[in-house]
Image (spheres, grey):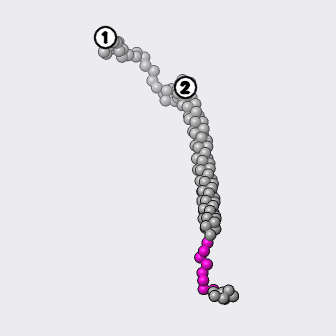
Amino acid sequence: MNSKIINKNIKRSFLSRRKKAKEQIDYWVNSTYIALVSLICLLLLYYVWILNVNATKWYNIRELEIEKKTLLMQKELLDVKIAELESLSTILKDDDLQNMDKIDNPEYLVIKDDVQYVYNN
């Protein structure tokens, strides 16, 4: 055959073992890199999501604590009002008590341990 004739129909499918090994290593390095970057991105998104959830919970807890303080203050004010209304001076000043009739000869019901009901004159 003539050395100056070039056959363009011959496909070069010959690859050396080194080249195949290098391409395989490059493929695994690239795929590992992509997997790690994806994992880091997913972990970062998960971290941001957890921060958001915790911030929302703490905001709700803070609102409930403020509401609790307000309700406790209202309860204390109501307790003071109840104590004021139950005091002896308030009861004695009541108009209904002033309009009551005085009893001249009261009769009492006395309860004893050995006798169930005894009427005392």
**Dot label at residue 49:** none
Q: Does dot 2 land on a helix, a strand or a loop?
A: loop
Q: Work out how far the residue at label 1 is from the one at label 2, CA to CA, in angstroms.
A: 36 Å
**Dot label at residue 87:** 2
The residue under label 2 is which amino acid type?
Ser
- Reply above or below: 51 against 7: above
Crowding at mark 2 (Cα within 10 Å: few <14, some 14-19, many 20+): few
The residue under label 1 is which amino acid type?
Asp
Quadrant assignment for the C terminus: top left
Closer to the camera, 87 or 38? 38
Q: Does dot 1 land on a helix, a strand or a loop?
A: loop
Query: Percent x, y for residue 88?
Result: 54, 23
In the image as oriented, which residue stretches furthest toward the front? Answer: 1
Query: Percent x, y for residue 35?
Result: 60, 59
Residue 108 is at least partly visible in this image? yes
Q: Residue sitting at 61 percent across and 72 percent down?
A: 15
In the image as oriented, which residue stretches furthest toward the right? Answer: 4
- Reply above or below: 10 against 103: below
User: Quarter-wise, where is residue 14 in the image?
Assistant: bottom right
Left or right of residue 85, residue 112 in this image: left
Quadrant assignment for the N terminus: bottom right
Q: Which residue is mark 1?
A: 114
Residue 38 is at least partly visible in this image? no
Closer to the camera, 53 or 102? 53
Query: Percent x, y for residue 24?
Result: 60, 65
Q: Residue sitting at 66 percent across and 88 percent down?
A: 2
| Residue 14 falls inside the magenta stretch | yes
Q: Which residues are magenta?
A: 8-15
Query: Percent x, y for residue 52?
Result: 61, 51
Labels 1 & 2 near each other (Cβ < 8 A): no
Magenta: main secondary structure = loop
